[in-house]
Amino acid sequence: MTNKEAYQGEMEAKLQEWGAKLDNLKAKIDEKGEDAKAELNEKIEALKTKKTNLEAKLVELKSSGDDAWESLTTGFQNAWHDLSIAFEDAVSKFSQDKE
């Protein structure tokens, strides 16, 4: 297995994990008041959009040649970073509203 294949497998696994976490977060929203629900649903929809964009970048990464792979990896990592920050923000908001 090449580094490229290992990286792609790792990213696919992380995306699946984040998908499960998003589903879990969405399920917990039902326990919130209406205002909190609306805000958290908005955050989750934004996360889903970012996740979908990241999945598209992963498809692009998979189909890339070795020359393009390096530059695409940088773009993927930037998108991953954006998703990470947005996810942390949503989890933080959920935790604050829980108290």
Image: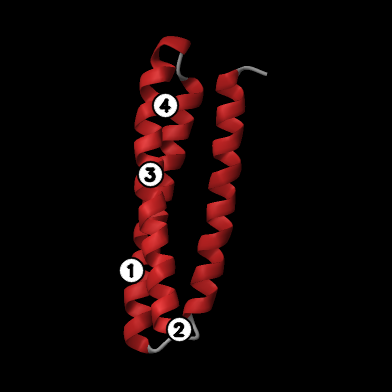
**Marks 1 and 4: which is nearer the front?**
4
- Looking at the image, which residue is at 48% across and 21% down? 63
Label 3–label 1 contact, CB within 8 A: no
Disc 3 marks which amino acid? His
Q: CA distance from mark 1 to mark 4?
A: 28 Å
Q: Secondary structure at mark 2?
A: helix
Residue kind at label 4, given as amino acid type: Thr
Are circles 1 and 4 on residues that touch, CB within 8 Å? Answer: no
Q: Disc 4 or 3, which lies upstream in sequence?
A: 4
Q: Which residue is mark 3?
A: 81
Which mark's residue is nearer the viewer, 1 or 2?
2
**What residue is shown with label 2?**
98
Query: At which x and y percent is residue 44?
Result: 40, 64
- Residue 68 numbered tag: none
Q: Amino acid at mark 2?
A: Lys
CA distance for labels 3 and 1: 19 Å
Q: Which of the two discs, 1 and 4, labels the residue nearer the N terminus?
A: 1
Identify which amino acid the numbered label 1 is placed on.
Answer: Glu
As drawn, 57 above or below 28: above
Seen at 47% across and 12% down, the residue is 66
Residue topped by disc 4? 73
Q: Residue at x 43, y 49 (%)?
A: 51
Give the quarter of the figure containing the N terminus. Answer: top right
Between marks 4 and 3, how big is the CA–CA gap?
12 Å
- Please tell me which of labels 1 and 2 falls first in the chain: 1
Number of the front mark, 4 or 2: 2
Q: Earlier in the sequence, mark 4 or mark 2?
A: 4
Question: Residue 65 placed where, x, y %?
Answer: 46, 13
Q: Which residue is mark 1?
A: 42
Between disc 3 and disc 2, whose residue precedes?
Answer: 3
Where residue 99 appears, as percent x and y from the top left, is 44, 86
